Image (tube, coloured by chain):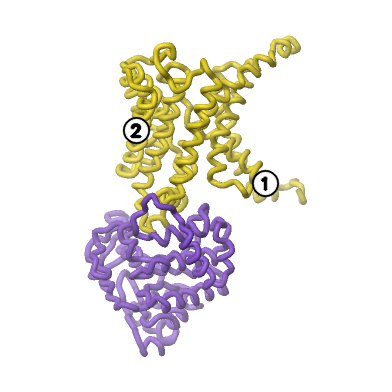
Amino acid sequence: MLDIREISKTFNPGTVNEKRALNKLSLHLDPGDFVTVIGGNGAGKSTMLNAIAGVWPVDEGRIELDGHDLTPLPEHKRAFLIGRVFQDPMMGTAPNMQLEENLALAKRRGQKRGLSWGVTRDEREEYRERLKTLGLGLEDRMTARVGLLSGGQRQAVTLLMASLREPKLLLLDEHTAALDPATAAKVLELSDKIVSEHNLTTLMITHNMTDAIQHGNRLIMMNEGQIILDVRGEEKKHLTRRELIDKFAALAGTPMETDSVLLS
Amino acid sequence: MSAYFASLNVLKLVKNMPGGVSQGLIWGLMALGVYITFRLLDVADLTVDGSFTTGGAVTVMLILGGWPAWAALLVAVVIGMLAGFITGLLHTKLGIPAILAGILTQLSLYSINLRIMGMSANKAVSVDKYHLLLTSRNIPMAILTAALIALALIILFYWYFGTEQGSAIRATGNNPAMSRALGININSMKLLGLSLSNGVVALSGGLMSQYQGFADINMGRGAIVIGLAAVIIGEVIGNALLGKHLNFFGIMTFVVIGGVIYYLVIIIVLWLKLNSNDLKLFTAVIVAVFLAIPYLRGQRISSFSKFRKGAKKDA
């Protein structure tokens, strides 16, 4: 399914701010894998997701998804395979456009956009049904500007948008980090539901160890641009936070430095 | 003072109004082009000062060359779109900030426009000799023609920006990061939007040159500011009158009306015997004020100043 072979990325090469964010990172995902990604700040988690999404080209290595070589493709040309939800709830939706317009844009992810009508009547029915499943009452606000919705609502909409046209790979980049705990739990539950309903191959970054252990069938830990731990199946189910923190200290050679990780 | 008021002739003002409406409609058309870039694409495109003149110059030269007026206008639109496309290329392919890219194209268009007009700063096209679509000699017809063209354009844009492609242009202006993630090539959309916008602006310039009976190298100077004025006046009035019911069709209509209102205000100002050389200053001040209003309104709701010593506690 997803095949990442030895990709590297260095930001600001040749300057004092030089940062090797990805260091010959390799990762293989099987269809239906739901992988949670943890690691300290600057470990390269988001950089890995951005490399897959094609926000910028990698320096070396190769990224394949569903038999397509993504490495030379710019971001918008990879979009037909990839659904994304960002950390910032404002980033995944167009605030001045109507809710149904946003959904219609997402429905056409990676498709040719021609001169037929932007939102059709049949589509509206589908969107209404899908919005109902969110349980947020948004099905009655389909012509409202998305900018009027709350952060949690917008994140739920983004999640729906990412799955409206079924992606080969779903990238969740700390998509609950900016939400209050109750909303975060709700959005996370929704993510679980959408992923399992469509059996989506998923990469989910989280700062929350408990979430990382509870969700998905596989967990990877990153440090200094590499994957230092890869746990799956039964072994993952029985992980504890304590074990993870100890493992990190042993593998990375330093204790996990972020408070948010320790406290969560 | 009383001598000043005595010198004002209300009849003269009323007589000038229809002319103001027709010119306002033509500027309102141009404002539609500005609206596409400024509001939908979120780019302040300064190409328009040049492409407006280009539209006028191309139209006049082709009509002088024996082309029918409508065909000349059509070519003007294409050339205008090309100008917008160049700005788009400078911006998207060469990484020049949009404002600067527009300024560069605008500057180069000054020379190009002179060349189009055979190195003369002014070319007349007389309605006595040529068949023109509209002229200041017949103002009611000019108003009708300009209004019909505006209506056709509004309908066209209402349709286009509702299509998949038009929605993608709006999404690009509204949230470029999301647009890329949804597979929209935002560079193409910017090229498309800038081309469309400048096509409309050139159309407006072509109509203006016919209306006034000549193309002038300076006819587009300040066009962007007039366009912004029309957009903002139109939005303010549209929101005041229709509020939540203001849809896209309504906004575009009010943008054109904004152009008319702007021009009527100019006529009143001239009637008040203000020096016409001060008009640009006057326009700039109006636009600055209207652009500042939303910001200042926000400041009133939340600002540091209410915590200053001596400020009213419950203001």
SS under mark 2:
helix
Circle 1 crowding by C-alpha within 10 Å: few under 14, some 14–19, many from 20: few
Label 2, label 1: how many angstroms apart (C-alpha)? Answer: 46 Å
> Going 70% across and 50% down the picture, which residue do you hit?
B307
> Going 48% across and 66% down the picture, which residue do you hit?
A126
Q: Is residue B290 left or right of residue A108?
A: right
Q: Colour of chain A?
A: purple
- The quadrant in which the N terminus of chain A is found is bottom left
Q: Counting residues from the N terminus, which is met first, the one under dot 2 or under dot 1?
A: 2
Q: Amino acid at mark 1?
A: Arg
Colour-to-chain, yellow = B
- Quadrant in which residue B234 is drawn: top right
Residue indicated by mark 1: B300
SS under mark 1:
helix
Q: Amino acid at mark 2?
A: Val
Asked whether the beta carbons under mark 2 and mark 1 sit within 8 Å of each other, the answer is no
Q: Is residue B176 above or below residue A41?
A: above
Q: Is residue A213 above or below residue A14?
A: below
Looking at the rendered image, the disc whose residue lies closer to the viewer, 2 or 1, is 2
Residue indicated by mark 2: B78
- Quadrant in which residue B105 is drawn: top left
Residue A65 picture location, percent across and down: 27, 69
Circle 2 crowding by C-alpha within 10 Å: few under 14, some 14–19, many from 20: some
> Going 43% across and 45% down the picture, which residue do you hit?
B160
> Going 44% across and 14% down the picture, which residue do you hit?
B127
Q: Is residue A66 above or below residue A145?
A: below
Residue A18 in sight from this viewpoint? no
